[in-house]
Image (cartoon, grey):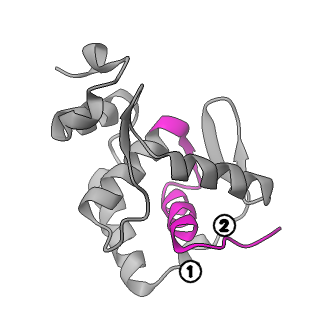
Amino acid sequence: MKKPSYKRQKALLALLDTFEGKLSKTDLQKYMFLYVKEFSDQEHYAFVPYHFGSFSYEMYKDIATLERNGLLSLSKNHIETTIDGFFDDISTDEQRNITSFSMKYRELKGNELIKYVYNKYPYYAIKSKIANFRVR
């Protein structure tokens, strides 16, 4: 099992850790988007408007790399860490930011999370195939 190489990968794994190590693929994209926009001191990932709202190609590649390295397990709809303890691999400032983020957004999941992101950041919903169903 190879350790993550980049700070952004460590942040991704730490974010997953704060959500008990398992999230839907869509929720993880939305959470990381909100984290980068509102809490992080670093822009770990760039996001573009896509079929389900904000999407990061780089994050998508990192997820594949982390799976290949045995740190993540992917199913059809979920992403799960295979071991715990990634939170300790990030800086104290990043730990504080992720904890604050998690406390603010942990109750938003699924459709409610998508609706929140689409309403707060409508630019990222311009190419969405689901925006008409979600935003109201």
Packing grade of label 2 (10 A; few <14, some 14-19, many >=20) is some
Task: Give above or below for 133 relative to 127.
Answer: above
Q: Position of residue 32 (x, y in %)?
A: 41, 53
- Please say if the residues under marks 1 and 2 sit with CB atoms less than 8 Å apart: no
**Which disc is residue 88 wearing?**
1
Whether residue 21 appears in magenta in the rendering, the answer is: yes
Q: Label 1's element?
A: helix
Name the quadrant containing residue 77: top right
Q: Residue furthest bottom?
A: 92
What span is colored magenta in the figure?
1-26
Residue type of the residue flagged with mark 2: Asp
What is the number of callouts on the image? 2
Residue topped by disc 2 = 84
Q: Position of residue 25 (x, y in %)?
A: 54, 38
Q: Residue at x 65, y 73 (%)?
A: 5
Whether residue 96 appears in magenta in the rendering, the answer is: no
Task: Give above or below for 112 relative to 128.
Answer: below
Left or right of 116 in this view: 127: right
**Which disc is residue 7 wearing?**
none
